[in-house]
Structure formats: C-alpha cells, structure tokens
Amino acid sequence: MASAMVSASASLRVAVVTAPASSRRAAGAAAAPTTSSPLSSRLAGRPRRSGGHSSLLAPPSAAPAAAAPAMAGVDQTTARELLAWLTVEKGLPSGAANAVSFGDGGKATLVNDVRAGEPLIEIPQNLAVTSVDVTDSPIVSGLAAGRGELIGLSLWLCHERYKGRLSDWAPYIATLPAAGPNHPLLWSPADISKLLQGSPIAAEALSRAAAAEEEYNSIRAVIQSDPANYPADAYTFLTKAAFLDALATVLARAVWLNAANCYAMVPLIDLLPLVGAPPPGVNPAVAGGGTAAGKMGLGAAACVVDYDAATECVSAVCTAECRQTVAVTVVDPLARNNGELFLATGCVDSSHSGDFMMFSASTTTTDRLYTAKTQILEGMGMSADNQQFPVFADRMPLQLLAYMRFARVQEPSELMTVSFEEDRIVSPMNEYEVLQLLMGDCRVLLGEYESSSEEFELLQLKEKGLTERQISAARLRLSEKKLINATTTAVRRRLAPIRGIPTKQGLEDPNADLIEIFDAIENLPNKPKEMFNEFQKWARGDYEEKNRGGGGKGKSGCS
C-alpha cells in the first residue's frame, strides 16, 4: 500500500528516515541521507562545495541523455500501460502527465510547448514508493529495519518482482527491468581494475561491490538466525543475484526528494533520463543544452524534481521555455559528478556542464605552526588532514588554492593574510610553491591512467565491437582527464608570469627579481663545476690578455 506521506510539516511522511540536516551543496542543493547501513553510507554522492566564482558557463553542445541500463528494457507499450494503470486504477488526474510522451527505452519528449516553471508531470504522494511502503510490507519490513532507505527499497523491489502479476504494483514493476550485468555494481573486480585503471572512482567501485555483498550476507544471516520469524520457504525469492540486481535498479531509478528529505520510487518520473547538474549558482536549464534548449530538434527540457507540499505531489518542473518534440530530462538533485553518476546509473553524461573532481589537501604535521593552523581550520569547519575540494573545468579552485596557501605559510604574521573568500596572493614565493604542488598533483593523477592523453580514449571510442562496459569506462576516463587537463592549463597560466614565460601582456616580466632568486637556487648544484672551469681558465692564462688591458678595436680597455 502506498505511503500516506503526510506530516505536520506538510512533507512526505517517511517512517525510517535517517537523513542528515546538512545540505549536499553550498548552493542549497539536495542533501543525501546518512544511514547506519555499511553500504548505504557509500551510495549517496559526495558533498559538493562552491569553488571559485559563480559566473555562467558557456552553453554546452546539446546531446541526448543516454538511458540508464535499468531503463533500456522499457518499451513504448510498457510505459503507456503504466500511464493507463495510474490513470484508471490509481486515480491519477488526466492532465498530470499530458505534457510528456514516452517512447521506447523510456525516452520522453514534450507533446506541446511549455513555459519555465510549468510542471510536466505530477505524481500524487500515494503513488510514490518510500520507506513507509517498506515498513508496511510484512515480508521485508523486519529485514529492512535499521538499514538504509535504498536497501529497504531494494528488498521491497525483490519481493514485488517475485510476486509477478500478483503484485499490486505489477504495471509499475514492469517498468523496472533488471539492471543487467553492465551496471558497475555487478562488474567483477578484474573488470573494475582493468577498465577503470587510473580513475579515482575505481577504489570506490570495488568498495561498493564488496559492501553490497556484505549487506546481502548480513540479511541472510538474520533470516537464518531466526527461522520462526523468517521461514526459509518465504524467502526463496531473496537470492544474491536478485538482491544485487534490485539494488542496482534502485540506485539507478530512485529519486531524491529534497523537500521531503527521502528517497522515493516515483512512477513515470523515474523514467526520465538523469543528467548532471550545472555548477552552483548556474541556471539548471543549462543542463538541457543552455540556449539550445527549447529550439526545434535541439537541446532538452531540463526538469527539477521535488515534492510540492502545496499540491501533495512529486513534480517534475521545467526550468526553461521549451518547444514540443524536445527530449525531457531530469537534473540530478544530488549534484553528483560523472564518477558518482556512473556508479549509481552505469551511464556517463558526456555533456555534464557541472562535472568536477575531488582534490584533497592537507597541512604538514611537522610544521611548527601545525597546531595553530589546525585550530583555525577547524574553526572554519575544515580538516587539517585530507580536506576535500571540488575542482570544476570552468574555474580555478579558489578554495583549494586558499587552503594550500594557508598550509604552506611559514610565518605567524602571514596566517591571517590568507583569504578563503577572495583570490588573494600571500606572497610570490608562497604562490609559486602552491602552484607547483598543484601542478604536481595533476601530473600524478594523469600518470595513474594507462595513457595520460585524452587521445587514447577518443581513439578507443571510435573502435568497433566495444562492449557497453568498455564504452562507459572510456567515457568516464575521458571526462576525468578533461577536468585534470583543464586544471593543469589554468595552473600554467598562473605560473607563466612567475616563471618568466612571455604572456599576452608583453615580454616584460614584473617578477624579474623573484625569478632571479629561484634561478640562483636552482643553479647552486652547478657552482662547484663552474668554479673548477674558471680555475682551469686561469691556469691556462686565458685571463692574462684581459688583465693587461687588451681592449679590442684599437681601444685601450681603460676607462
């Protein structure tokens, strides 16, 4: 039975929600729940902080969003049968989804022109599946107790799939086909290590796969330890393969509702392809193709999905004025990067306008100012060890730069000169050191891949006969390399004036004195050899003519 989803705060009612109060991103995006489950704590996307300025991106080239593996098996007939069932059997208002037409593979397009802020689909709260429905199920409620929402929804899906046509949700379950072997959760450790070589998310993929098996073993242990409450013949449906596939499907299809602070399985809305969210402060419409969105045959209608307390519905609201026939997509409410989206859905958004990578920075424990720096950083809500920062392609990571400047400061008087709000240089020498360290980090990251060049993946993607795993892995590695190379280019531009590289401002170097200092330091190892060469010249008498005042061109050489 669907959840009542009504509370004093007029938001979706969730019985077993352990979501945190902290927000997921600095710009006020959705928070992701934290649970006590060993796996659930790894499933939500990483927190995202605002990095650098918030200027608008140039609109990316529009590209159709690829259907996640869990949607690839949904044909037009299945999608329309779901809509008919919702309307006839469940009382869905006739105009709740008239603006969208579903085709094969869950592809959705606009039926008519729409305005910005107009809801395209509205699903009443009683038709969304949440942890309340899990609690109401006598078969899986006990097993789901104390575990994360996503685990509970996976158990619910396992049981409803087992019921088949006898399930009260059969038409909806038909639109939740098996995720298939290409979902990263179902990859073998060998494939993860090989195809994701060098990727920062390779270790996370291995960890999640291991944690998923650990979760299943934990559930099985509960069943075996209490046969009175969990008869073995009642849980034959809960095999390891069935649970892992259901979990992969839930990861790809569950919708995070920020206003209700919960995950939900929402019919029709969870058929819409998921695209990456733009950076903080940027209009979500950019995710649909920027200025291309709304033009005939170009872009997409990017929607924001959340619970609307006024209408008591889960709504997909269009973010821009769009014309009919354009594709309909959903902007990721968790603002995850391509790595996290790949782990959740098995797909990579090649046009992700807000893609980012997490860089870590730490202070030096042997620093004489370590204690003072630690206290200051903790006062700002940061850590002195392994502090994570998002790095975007369109801007310098100013928060990361400020942290590194602070970490490399050597004088107590300079501690308070570091600004985390402005792009302010502490000193030329400090800036040079910080930029060189950041450049080194980028080189290390690129060196982890089989090839550091983007050309490697571009050529690979042109090959014929590639498997789905090879294609998605190559796209992910390519997106990561683009971010690293963009950061490298930005650092080089900043280093150019300090290192004396000619810039567009001219050949005159404003930091000539500083360069002379660094050149002198770098040339110290050559000084003994230079001294020996000078001694040999003196012994040969090379300087005798010069000492006698021999000037050249008939001059005496004397001033």
Image (cartoon, helix red, strand yellow):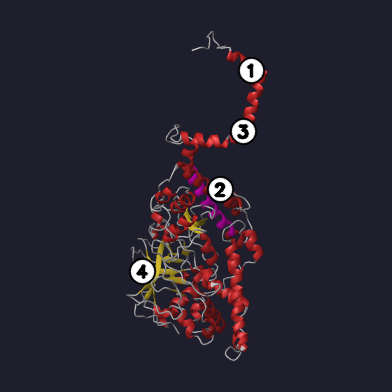
Q: Residue furthest top?
A: 554
User: Which label sits in the foreground, 1 or 4?
Assistant: 1
- Image height of 485 relative to 295, above or below: above
| Residue pointed to by mark 2 | 440
Q: Mark 3 sits on what residue?
A: 526
Tell me whether the residue at label 1 lies in contact with that at label 3, contact meaning CB atoms closer than 8 angstroms: no
- Please check the rendered image and state whether residue 476 is part of the magenta-colored stretch, yes or no: yes
Find the magenta span and give its range: 473-493
- The quarter holding residue 114 reads bottom left
- Secondary element under disc 2, as helix, strand or loop, is helix
In this view of the protein, which residue sits in the foreground, 330 or 476? Answer: 476
Question: Given the image, on which type of amino acid does mark 1 rest?
Answer: Asp
Q: How many marks?
A: 4
Displayed quadrant of residue 548: top right
Counting other residues with Cα less than 10 Å from the Cα at mark 3, is it few (<14), some (14-19), or many (20 or more)? few
Contact, mark 4 vs mark 2 (Cβ under 8 Å): no
Residue linked to disc 4: 119
Q: Disc 1 versus disc 3: distance between alpha carbons? A: 21 Å
1 or 3: tag closer to the N-terminus: 3
Q: Using the numbered discs, state the Cα–Cα distance from disc 2 to disc 3 in whole angstroms.
A: 25 Å
Q: CA distance from mark 1 to mark 4?
A: 89 Å
Q: Secondary structure at mark 4?
A: strand
Amino acid found under the numbered disc labelled 3 = Asn
* Residue annotated with mark 1: 542
Q: Nearer the viewer, mark 2 or mark 3?
A: 3
What element does badge 3 sit on?
Answer: helix
